[in-house]
Amino acid sequence: MIDFEAIERRFEAARNGRGAFDDTFQQIAERVLPQAADFGGRRSPGEPRTEKMFDGTAALAAQRAVAAIASFFWPSNQRYQKLSTDNEHLNKVHRVKVYLDALTDILFKARYSPLAAFEAQQGESALQAFVFGTGLMFVDYDIKAESLRYKSLHLGQTYILEGAAGKVDTVFRCWRWSLRNIEAAWPGKLPEKHRRTLEKNPDSEIEVAHCVMPREDYQGDGVGYRAMPWASCYFLPGEKCLLDEGGFPQWPFSVLRYMTSPGEVYGRSPAWLARSNIRDLNTTKRSD
């Protein structure tokens, strides 16, 4: 059973403890990736975000870097990965090679399905890694569509924690969602005050959070999500409302960190090093 109150405390600690990072992320975003410039606050849809960006050199450099990396590491017109076993002798058996090649074809067909949106979401995740130093992507399976689903996560709405091995093993992601969508996803789970609002204004939005972390009581046997090594829960932050509890058989996130400093969980990017140059260039362009 998930300790929901402990998860809420960890979520608030993870969010409140990132203040210094968020200040830097915001400064970089305003001049390099303005569409993501909402760290520490929420901006209105359609609001101008380029008021501090007077030169596009850094932004274009980031876009070109991602395009170069994509063409090298995950080109859409090539099979850049191949399945194999951990037994070298078995890998040389012809029938095994044919079988693994067929599985590889199935993998790439699922990954590059229009419903999966891998290429676009991987590009967005890599762009955030180049600009901020950390990029995340959520990988799930859409049961209704019978398709893989890739989703790049905005760093401003995502918080990470490391395990004892120095690897990210806990992710909190949050977003604002309409009451009618929440009710459709988890019928009857909204608190009474929100149910009253739902009747009058179903499109009113509130914050929803999702946590994935190692399951503390995992034993590898049993059935259902309790037998899965990764615990998952959806909740309403600050409202003591657990919407859903589940799990994953495998780690469902891709976490890219450009480089990390000792004692820090989030990565640092080239934009961190060039931040003063980027700021000075934009200031010069503004005065021209």
Image (cartoon, grey):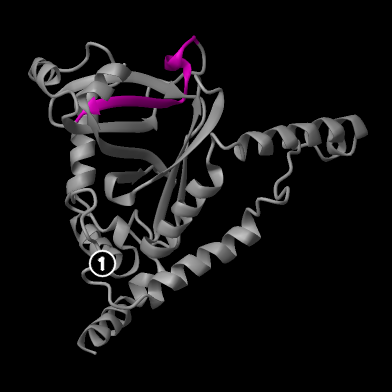
Residue at image point 34% right, 63% down = 33
Residue 138: image location, x then y, percent: 44, 39
In the displayed structure, 117 sits above or below 193; it is: below
User: For the magenta stretch, what is the residue range?
Assistant: 222-236
Q: From the viewer's perspective, is 143 left or right of 96?
A: left
Does 115 sit above or below residue 154? above
Please say whether residue 50 is one of the residues in the magenta stretch. no
Residue found 67% across the figure and 36% down from its top: 109
Residue position for label 1: 50
**Residue 134 location in percent, x, y?**
39, 56
User: Foreground: 211 or 219?
Assistant: 211
> In this rendering, is residue 101 above or below 22?
above
Residue 75 in sight: yes
Relative to 71, 272 lies left or right: left
Q: Position of residue 175 (x, y in %)?
A: 26, 38
Q: Residue at horizontal 23%, vertical 54%?
A: 38
Q: Amino acid under label 1? A: Thr
Residue drawn at (46%, 12%) of the image: 224
Q: For the image shown, how many numbered marks are present on the structure? A: 1
Q: Does 224 lie within the magenta span?
A: yes
Residue 168 percent coordinates (x, y): 41, 45
Left/right of residue 165 with respect to residue 75 in the rendered view: left
Q: Quadrant of residue 183?
A: top left
Q: Residues within 10 Å of mark 1 (few under 14, many from 20)?
A: some
Seen from the viewer's position, the closer of residues 20 and 23 is: 23
